Amino acid sequence: MGLDLTLFMADWKQLRALPVEHRTDALDDAVRPPEPDEAYRCGRRPAGGLLWPPDPAVAWCAEYVFATTGAYSPHGRTGAAWADMRLLVDASVREAMDTFLVGLIPEADPAVGPASTGGGIFPPAADRRQAGILLVCPPEVLPGKARAWERAEPRIDELRGPFAAECEGWAGRPDTFEDFVALLREWGHVTAEAARRGWGLVGLP
């Protein structure tokens, strides 16, 4: 089985109020409590979009459920595809896409790199052979990312030619341009929502 990506949107003030060693568990437990309620068992989990905690008292975070994929590797393939094609893209689109994607979608397999702790907001992985925190995007950087996506999205079709030239048919890259764009749009949606709330993003394995 491959690595999964579970993405949370969270209020940083509430997260920082918790002991550092409890923060990852608190995110997981808020959305998927140890004894799920009947609504969760009966299909409360959406096919895509935000999954809010069943208890309104802990609604300081939500899970973003990707409609495209819950697996981690397609996100890495998307990052690699962008790295391949970016020099073929108009400079203004390239700048916006770079700003949007840096820190969100990686190019590397987290199993071969150091585990992130988000500048100390999370503890390091206990076992260095295990993937640690996959991404930490603090609230202060998200408005800039949301604005960058607003600039890039209307021109997204300009990436079709560069994608065909550098990525189409290559192993380790998205299968189609449509797959590539669909995942980018989901990141655009959750980034805009987190920026609107003044919250941050956390990706857990």
Image: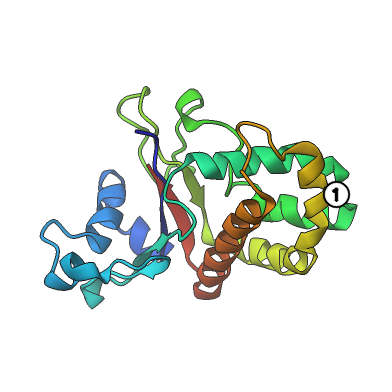
Q: Residue at x 62, y 31 (%)?
A: 171
Whole-percent x, y for residue 159 in the image: 79, 53
**Is 81 rendered above or below residue 94?**
above
Whole-percent x, y for residue 82 in the image: 71, 43
Q: Quadrant of residue 51?
A: bottom left
Q: Is residue 28 left or right of residue 178?
A: left
Q: Residue at x 56, y 39 (%)?
A: 76
Whole-percent x, y for residue 40 in the image: 20, 67
What type is the residue that disc 1 sits on?
Val
- Residue bearing the label numbered 1: 89
Quadrant in which the N terminus is drawn = top left
Quadrant in which the C terminus is drawn = top left
Q: Is residue 177 left or right of residue 38?
A: right
**Is 19 rendered above or below residue 132?**
below
Q: How is the image coloured?
A: rainbow
Secondary structure state at the residue bearing disc 1: loop
Q: Quadrant of residue 117?
A: top left
Neighbours of disc 1 within 10 Å: few (<14), some (14-19), many (20+): some
Q: Quadrant of residue 174?
A: top right
